[in-house]
Image (cartoon, rainbow, N blue to C red):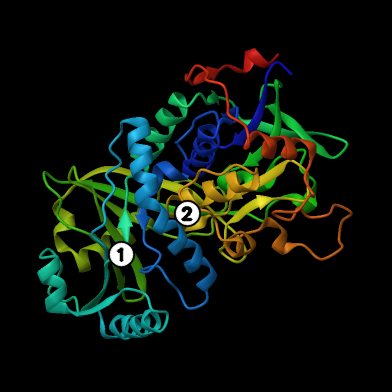
Amino acid sequence: MADHFDLLVAGGGVIGLSVAWRAARRGLRVAVADPAPASGASHAAAGMLAPVSEVTYTEEPLLRLGLASLERWPAFAAELADASGHDLDYRTDGTLDVAFGSDDLAALDDLAAFTARLGLPAERLTGRECRRLEPMLAPAVRGGLLAGGDAWVDPRRVTAALLAALERTGGALVRARVAELLTSSGTVTGVRLAGGETVGAGLVVLATGAWSGSLEGVPPEALPPVRPVKGQIMRLRSPAPILRRCVRGVVHGSHVYLVPRGDGETVLGATQEEMGFDTRVTAGGLWELLRDARELVPGVTELEVSEVAAGLRPGTPDNLPLIGPTIVPGLHLATGHHRGGVLLAPLTADLCVSETGEGGGTGEPDPGLAAVCSPLRFREPGSREHTPHKHGSQEHTPQERALRERGSREHPPREHRLREHTPQEYR
């Protein structure tokens, strides 16, 4: 192997880049391997940071993760903007959930009661109060629920900032697909790239989103149970923003959201389709989005269509992400975030860096949160000889112990430059 890293992240979306940046800031020698970083689900995402407005009756553990990560976002955004020199278009005006028909209004009443029982900050509004906040809403809007603590950000700016920050911190970018996990005596030693070249690493973090469940070299029992969930979106443009805050709505049972950008763009989404790895944009999907959005904000039909796209969210059986060590020593996961990749990026980075023994995130993770999203939760007890790693225990690979020891030493200064390696360098 021509090069060796302390940590290699397979996947260059918002999750993988966040993990790599956090680790590089702690002085680890870090690489991100991705043939086209920041071009997948993160590129298509709307960027809502909305754990309160997205809460559902059966997903309270996901709500805990979302709230913990939302608390980290102000510091994460400030540090990233400072480290990269980029404006993230990070905004904190809240999310307005609105209802169109009487059935939708009843569902909103139930949601308001549920959030109240959980002690979440949400304010029930009449239709008239909703229109005072957002004058472009249709007269037919019957009522709303304002989650004033929700926020949103532009994911494309975030990933661009993460790439710039990683460069300034001395991380490496390998523009190639990771094709195989390499092990020796059952312990990770690195990866093989799609062109056949190898890269050594003491720790590999698998963050390839919807494709995380198919990496060669990973034992079948350690492959994450991740599936692709298709989402189609539209980007509309106007000279000035037509909304002040995110607007989510239920129209005859169908969910739709509109996310404004500071430059006049409005992101309209998103469908949820179990279609495998199909990324086609369909007329039916776009028609449904426009149909429902027009009921809530009639003016959207006058806006210019600047882009249509389809992305693949990485879904899991329980809708919770997979973050942390696996049964394979030296292999960690950071995947399965479904709709919440952008929201959960700061928490995921903190959890991953914490598992290597390195601190320095935007907050020390609660061990209970790590247990909620542990990749080991789907395993049957005693189904394999490998002993699961326990956070804070002595059960660590030599590579992981070395990473922990690095956290107690000062790291020598080095040139902060992102090297974009070509696969030929690893031959």
Is the C terminus in the top left, top right, bottom left or bottom right quadrant? top right
x, y percentage for residue 396?
Answer: 77, 45
Number of the label disc, if any, that sits on residue 111: none
The amino acid marked with disc number 2 is Leu
Q: Residues within 10 Å of mark 2 (few under 14, many from 20)?
A: many
Image coordinates of residue 381 in percent, x first then y, are: 83, 65
Q: Is 96 positioned to the left or the right of 285 in the image?
A: left
Sequence-first tag of 2 and 1:
1
Helix, strand or loop at mark 1: loop
Q: Specify whether residue 156 is in view.
A: no
Up-down relation of residue 365 to residue 331 (above or below): below
Q: Residue at x 51, y 73 (%)?
A: 60
Disc 2 to disc 1, C-alpha distance: 16 Å
Task: Tally the marks.
Answer: 2
* Residue highlighted by disc 2: 344
Residue at 35 percent of width and 56 percent of height? 48
Residues packed near mark 1 inside 10 Å, few (<14), some (14 to 19) or many (20 plus): many
Q: Nearer the viewer, residue 370 or 99?
A: 370
How far across and down, in percent of the image, does residue 75 sit? 37, 48
Task: Please indicate whether residue 368 sits to the left or right of residue 40 in the image.
Answer: right
- Disc 2 on helix, strand or loop? helix
Residue that numbered label 1 is attached to: 149
Whether 346 is drawn above or below 30: the answer is: below
Instruction: Say which of 75 and 315 sits in front.
Output: 75
Q: Answer left or right for 286 relative to 69.
A: left
In this rendering, the answer to whether 265 lies above or below 170 is below
